Image (cartoon, helix red, strand yellow):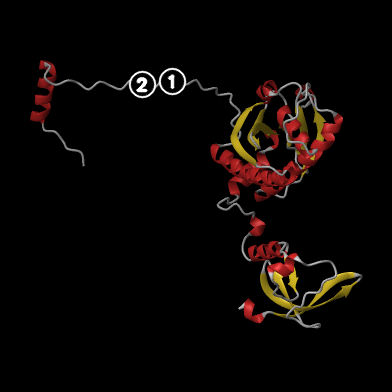
Amino acid sequence: MAEILSQQEIDQLLGKIQTGSEKVSEYEPEKEAMLYDFRLPNRISKNQLRTIKNLHDNFAEGLSSFLMTKLQTNVSININSVDQIYYSEYILSVSNPACLYTFEIKNTDIKGVLELSPELALILVDRLLGGNGKGTKNSKVITPIEQKVLYIFVERVMQELKKSWLQIENYNFILGSFESDIDFVQITSQSDSVLIITCEINVGDTKSLLNLCYATYAFDAVLTKLATQNFNTTRTSKFSGSAVKNIIVDNLKKTELYVNAEFTTAAISLKSLLELEIGDVILTNGKTGDEVTIKVDGKPLFYGVPGIVNGHKAVKVTSRSVKKLK
């Protein structure tokens, strides 16, 4: 509880101030005022922007995994920013010539633009054609042949967007046309707001940018679901409960394992090994007709018998290696 001063203590303080023995504390200077434009298109709240960023973090992770496999090099993708600006401002920020792909979400009025920086587009084309990504080109115009090569990447972007947006709804992202001039891309009016997702893509030691631009005039239905959905987990709603176990089992079933059959063993001196010639016979410890050991990732798990199926060498599994399984 705050201490209450008596009238005598108040008179003493006032007397010290009048005589100059007690200095009045100076007020801290006011913080510099910042200009705020009340016309800013804040259609989406900060919490909803945070959720959208989380969705696209999943998108960036999935796309980077695809590029690492496809390009055979280190690839990382980071979401730099999620902003709301006017479409007219976005138009001014796009380079000319540009590498733009329009898209839309099926059964909605939401339209968007996928923007690749010309540097990123040329790096991807070079890598996808077997180069090292350091090729040079005088013009930044994307040719029809390069557009066909980039189509593999752009289609994968649409797939990864669909996966990441599953947390909200099972949306289908439909790829539209390619444009090299932003003036021919009209996804909304210039006075309306758009949502810009800026991604930084590191391919090897090269940094480039990828932008996703969504027209927000048709985002009302999406924003309603953003407010009602529970996003405490990165799993989609259909992956909750008992379905999780089935999903894990299905993914495990698709896992590839290295299997080899060990027929028998034999001991031979290094001298004899060096003197081996074509046609020589090595005596082994096994007999014809003995079961062979079948190893999975180096671990003996089964027994089997060798044979031929459709002209191919094969091993038929006859029993489990019970001791090893325990």
> Which SS class for mark 2?
loop
Q: Position of residue 269 (x, y in %)?
A: 69, 71
Residue under the point 71% across and 44% down: 72
Q: CA distance from mark 1 to mark 2?
A: 8 Å
Q: Nearer the viewer, residue 296 or 76?
A: 296
- Residue 135 occupies which quadrant of the picture? top right
Q: Nearer the viewer, residue 206 or 166?
A: 206
Image quadrant occupied by the N terminus: top left
Above-or-below relation of 50 to 270: above
Q: Quick check: can you spot residue 117? A: no
Q: Nearer the viewer, residue 62 or 139?
A: 139
What amino acid type should be assigned to the residue bearing mark 2? Glu
What amino acid type should be assigned to the residue bearing mark 1? Ala
Q: Position of residue 64 (x, y in %)?
A: 67, 43
Residues at circles 1 and 2 in contact by the CB criterion of under 8 Å: yes
Q: Position of residue 34 (x, y in %)?
A: 47, 21
Local crowd size for mark 2, using a 10 Å CA cut-off: few (<14), some (14–19), many (≥20): few
- Residue 117 occupies which quadrant of the picture? top right
Above-or-below relation of 121 to 242: above
Residue under the point 58% across and 41% down: 48
- Residue assigned mark 2: 30
Label disc, if present, on residue 33 of the rendered structure: 1
Residue under the point 77% across and 27% down: 185
Residue under the point 68% across and 79% down: 321
> Which SS class for mark 1?
loop
